[in-house]
Image (cartoon, helix red, strand yellow):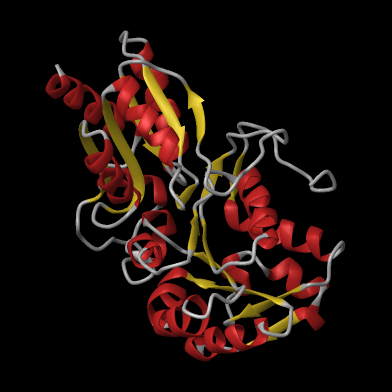
Amino acid sequence: MDKLQFWKVGEKVSLREAFGRVLVSLAKERNDFVLFDADVAGGTGAKPFVRQFPERVIQFGIAEQNMMAAAGGFSDFGIIPVVSTFAVFGTMRAHEQFRTAIAFPNRNVKLCCSHLGVDTGPDGATAQMLEDLAIMRSIPDTVVVVPADANELMGAFCSILEIRSPVYMRIGRSPAPVIFDSNHRFEIGKATRIKDGKDITVIATGVMVARAIEASDILKKKGISVRVVNLSTIKPLDNNEVLSAAKETGAIVTAEDHNVMGGMGSAVSEFVSQNHPVQMKIIGVNDRFGKSGESDELAQYFGLTAEHICKAVEGLLKRKM
C-alpha cells in the first residue's frame, strides 16, 4: 500500500480511476492475478492495466456468461481472476454462472463492476444498476464491498485479493469527493464511524457517504447531533457497529445509490429488527428504473442529496420523540 499514490482529501476522483491505478500498482509486485475483460476496459477504468500488462488480460468480448464460467475454472489453477465489466452484465446477465460456477464451489474470483446506481449518469436506465446489492448479497458465501471513495477502493481491492472467497465489489463511475487520507485502513466486515453523534445515526455506503457527511454538518448547525457510519462492506455486515448505532442513538437513516428494496438499508433493517428494533428510514431509489442525466442532476431528481438526508433525519427524529 505504501507504493500506491493516494489522492488528497477533498479532490473529486472517479473510483474507476482508482481501480486502474491499484491494478497496475499491485501487478508490479505480484503475479497471481489476471484481468478478465468483456470489451469494456475503457469504461471500467482497467485500461491502464490492459496497456501495461497485456499478457495478463483475457478478452472475452460481449460474452459475459462465458467469461464468468471460465473464471471459475481458471481459479482452480491458483491464479485469481479479476472479472471486470458493467454491473448490469456482471450481476444479471452472468448471474447464474457466478452463482453456480463460482459461489457454490467457493472459488476465488473477484467480480469488480462499474456503472451502478444513478451515479452512472447519461448512460441511462438500462446501464444504471440499481438491483446489484440485492442480487449479490443473497448469494451464499459471497463478500459484497462498496468503497466510499477512490482511496478506500484501492485499500479494498488489496484486501479482497488477500482472502480466498468470491467477492463482488462496486466501482463508481462519476467523480466523487475523496473522504479518506492515506492512513485509512479498509477491513472487510468493518464499518468506519466517521462522525460521532447521539441523536441519530446515518449509515451510508458508496457515493452517499460524502453526502451523509455534508448532511451531518448542516444538521449540526441546527443543534442535531448525527453519527455518520461508512458501511463499506455490505456482507458480512458489521453487526457490532449497527447494534451500537441502534442502542446508542435510537434511530437510523440508511443512504445508498440503489433500490430501497433488498440493498444496504434492507441488510441493516433485517439485523436491527431482530436484535434491537428502532425507528428507521431507508433512502434510495424508490422501486423504479433510472433516467438519463448528469449524476448530480439524477441525485437531486431521485432524492439522494445531502438535503434529502437532512429532511429524512428531521422527519425520523419527530417519530423518535
* Number of numbered callouts drawn: 0
| Picture layout, residue 309 above or below residue 110 | above
- 130 relative to 308, above or below: below
Q: In this image, 295 relative to 79: left or right?
A: left
Q: Give how far across and how far down residue 250 sits, in percent.
A: 26, 23
Residue 137 appears in the figure: yes
- Residue shown at 28% from the left, 50% from the top: 266
Above or below: residue 85 compared with residue 224: below
- Residue 282 shows up from this direction: no
Residue found 38% across the figure and 57% down from its top: 117
Image point (45%, 28%), residue name: 213
| Occupied quadrant, residue 67 | bottom right
Quarter in which the C terminus is drawn: top left
Give the image location of residue 16, x and y in percent: 60, 58
Residue furthest toward the front? 275
Left or right: 248 with respect to 213?
left
Vertical order, 56 against 113 (above or below): below
Between 44 and 260, the one lying in front of the other is 260
Can you give x and y, in whole percent of width and height, for residue 299 in the image? 34, 45
Left/right of residue 133 with respect to residue 261 in the rendered view: right
Task: Tell which of 6 and 109 is nearer to you.
Answer: 109
